[in-house]
Every structure is written in structure tokens, then in C-alpha cells.
Amino acid sequence: MSTRPDTTSKQRTPVFYGWWIVLSGMTLSIYTSGVFFYGFTALFNPLRAEFGWSRAATSLAFTLQRGETGIAAPIVGILADRYGPRSVMVVGVVIAGIGMLLLSRTNSLPTFYAAFFIAAVGFSAASPNVGYIAIAAWFQRRRSRAMALLATGAGISGFMVGILVWIIDLTGWRNALVILGVILWIIGIPLSLMFRHRPEQYGLHPDGIEPEHISSGVPKAPAPSFSYSRIIRMEAFWILGTVNSLWIFAHTGVVAHIIPALTLDAHASLGLAAVAASGIPIFSTVGRLAMGTVADFMDKRLIMIISMLTQLIGLVVLAMGVGSAWGIMISMAFYGFGFGGYIPVRRALQADIFGSKDFGKVIGSMEIISLAGGLGGPVFAGWVADVQDSYQLAFWVFSLGIIVAIALMLKAKPVGSYEPETITSA
């Protein structure tokens, strides 16, 4: 069965092409998230063992990754809006693979940071964020569900942490990075070529539903139209940006340090810590699917609050330094489910409020606001551990940040309170 969009007619196909975009983005996300985002924790101890770097110095690479993402996100968003997600993602995969090969040749902190930055540039352009830009245009009624399926890629990628630990033990961390970079090219380029920009360019409609076939008895998905200049002046833009900055401050700090934190504070074995680290994204898969599905039928603000509350429970248990295997896995289950549920619903809420026309710019600008949180989380946690030989204080601070984020979401107004513009300007 052909998966190419029909550019010559509006004939309906058995599977709406937007779902092929979701599947391609989800598959690519499994690999990129597993290798670069979650996989960093598997490299943490081998790098420190070989070079003797401090936890804070090693964590700075993760901070560079977040910093590059925040700086490059507006550029990536503008390019994706203008040239389409496909071109951006192909280039991103190529650059990311080059960065992985350069990382394998690291012999000092400066070269490590430089190579990590290059890899981060590529992974930023090949990130799920670019997939969300495409999905915002291809879906309206099923937007949360489509974004949830894309987001499950990062959740499923949790199993790769254990695989990375195994590959590093088997081949060494340098050879492991070479292998991972080559595999990225082999699978990433074909998957990126599956992306398309907007359904209207191929004679299709969002969700694959012809306008005349839409039942008048079913509420229409919000389709606002705001100029970008107005978007960045809206209260919702700054509330959502600040909430995400607090959320990502906590999450990047936890993800970058979860294995060393469990081995240090909970006295877990390396094997148990690796399993627990894999558990976060695996449990998050359930959260992404469950919350993303429910969010198409309920107030997305409420779903985001519930997700953060669930995540907070797991984070508090983690901050308490529970040492039993059951306690560790329970905290990972709560944390993973809540963190997973937050991700697709946040993007869907942004698209509902601001529309899909300049969604790349919106995502990019949100990343700039979130930059401080992403930069600070990993280094803050590493610094606390260096000073106190424990991560518990850092995790309590992260918990406080999530509480403030929940309070801000309670202040956010419902989607229907934002009136679209009748005339828009670029």
C-alpha cells in the first residue's frame, strides 16, 4: 500500500497520511531520545572514570545540550515553518551522526563540550519538536492523541538505557558512540523523508476529514489565528513558558543524574539503577498515551496539573532517598507516568491556543523561555552532589519548582477565552 500523499486528487486512502508522519516521528524519537537524552546518564560514570572530571563539569555537557536547544529552537522552528519539517529533520540527522563520531574522539573537556554541542545541534533539528510542528498542521480533532503517540517514542526509548550500558561495557564508550552514530544515519534519514508539511499542499484536510463530512453535532477543534507579534504578548504564552521552565529545570536535573543519584543516595547497585533509569521513560509511555487520549475530551489545563502532581509524588519519594528496590521502582512509576502525561498535552494545548500557522515559532520561543531551567537543572544537581555528597537537597528544590508550576497552571485561562484575530499580520 502506498503511503505517499495524493497530490492530484482528494480521494480518501485507507490510512490518513498524517498517521504515517506520527509513526515515522515516533520511531525516530525512540532512537534519538534513547541515545542522546536518556542515554547521557549511561555515559556519566565511564567519562568520570576515564578523565576524573567532577560531576558538575561532566553535567555541563548536558547543560550545553539544553542551551543549544533553547538557542537553536527558534531558528529550527522558523525553518520548519518555511521549508517544512522534512528538510530540517534530514539535515539534523546528518549533523547528529557527525556529532556522535566526534564525541567518540574526545580527549579533553573542551573537545567533549565542542563535540557534544555539534551533536546537540543535529538532535535539536531532528527532535520530536519538529514532529509536533507537522502534527499540529495535520491534526485538529485528534491532535492530543497524535501528539501522544509521537511522544511515546521517547517513552519507549527507555529500554535503550540498559542497551547502552551493555554496549559500553562490551565495546567501550568510544566504540559505542561510533556504532550509535552510524545506526542513526541508517534509520534516521529514511524516516525523516516520510515527513510532509501541511495536508492542504496534497489535497487533504486535517484528520483526513472532508469539511462537508464533519458532523454538526460534534464540537469543532479550536482553530485560532493569531499573528506572532500578538502571541508573544499573550498572558498564556508567558504562563506556559514559565511553567515549562520550572518543569524542565527539575526533569533535566533528574534525568542527567538518576543513575549516580540512586547509587549514591539509595545505595542501589548499578544494575538496579540502570533498570530504574529505564523505568522512567517506560512508565512515561503509559502516561503519554493515557493523558494524551483523555486530553482530546477534557480540559488540557487540568490534565497538565494532574500529570505534574503525579510526577511530584515520585520526585518527593526520590528526594527522601528510599533505598528499597520496591520504593525506587514505585517512585519511578509515579514520576515517569506524570512526566510522560505532561509532554503531549502541553504541545496540544499550545496548538489549541495559538494555532498551527506559526507553531514552529511558538515552540522555538517557548524553548527560549525554558532555557534557564534546562541550563540550570543538571549543573545544579551536580554541584549539590559535589558539595554535600548527596542529591537529596537538589531533588527537594526540584519538587518546590514543580509545586510553583502547578500554581501557575491554576492561573491559566481556558482555551475558549482567547479570541482569534480577524486580520493577521506576519
Image (tube, helix red, strand yellow):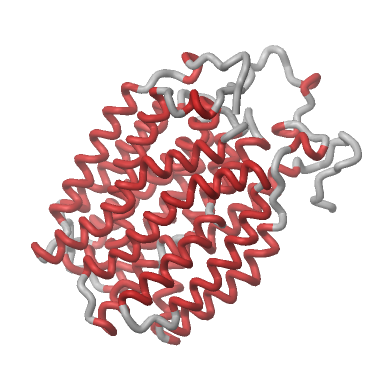
Inspect this view and state whether residue 274 appears. yes
Residue 277 image point, x, y percent: 35, 62
Residue 143 image point, x, y percent: 59, 34
**Residue at position x 39%, y 75% from top?**
165
Q: Check the picture and name the quadrant holding the C terminus.
A: top right
In this rendering, the answer to whether 308 lies above or below 50 is above
In this rendering, the answer to whether 174 lies above or below 422 is below
Q: Is residue 277 left or right of residue 230?
A: left
Camera-side residue of 386 and 214: 386
Residue furthest out toward the front: 426
Residue 307 image point, x, y percent: 37, 37
**Total numbered badges shown on the rendered structure:** 0
**Residue at position x 49%, y 55% from top?**
154
Residue furthest out toward the bottom: 171
Inspect this view and state whether residue 35 appears. no
Camera-side residue of 44 and 270: 44
**Residue at position x 71%, y 32% from top?**
206
Q: Is residue 97 left or right of residue 65?
A: right
Residue 156 image point, x, y percent: 50, 57
**Residue at position x 22%, y 53% from top?**
318
Residue 192 is drawn in which quadrant?
bottom right
Residue 327 is drawn in which quadrant?
bottom left
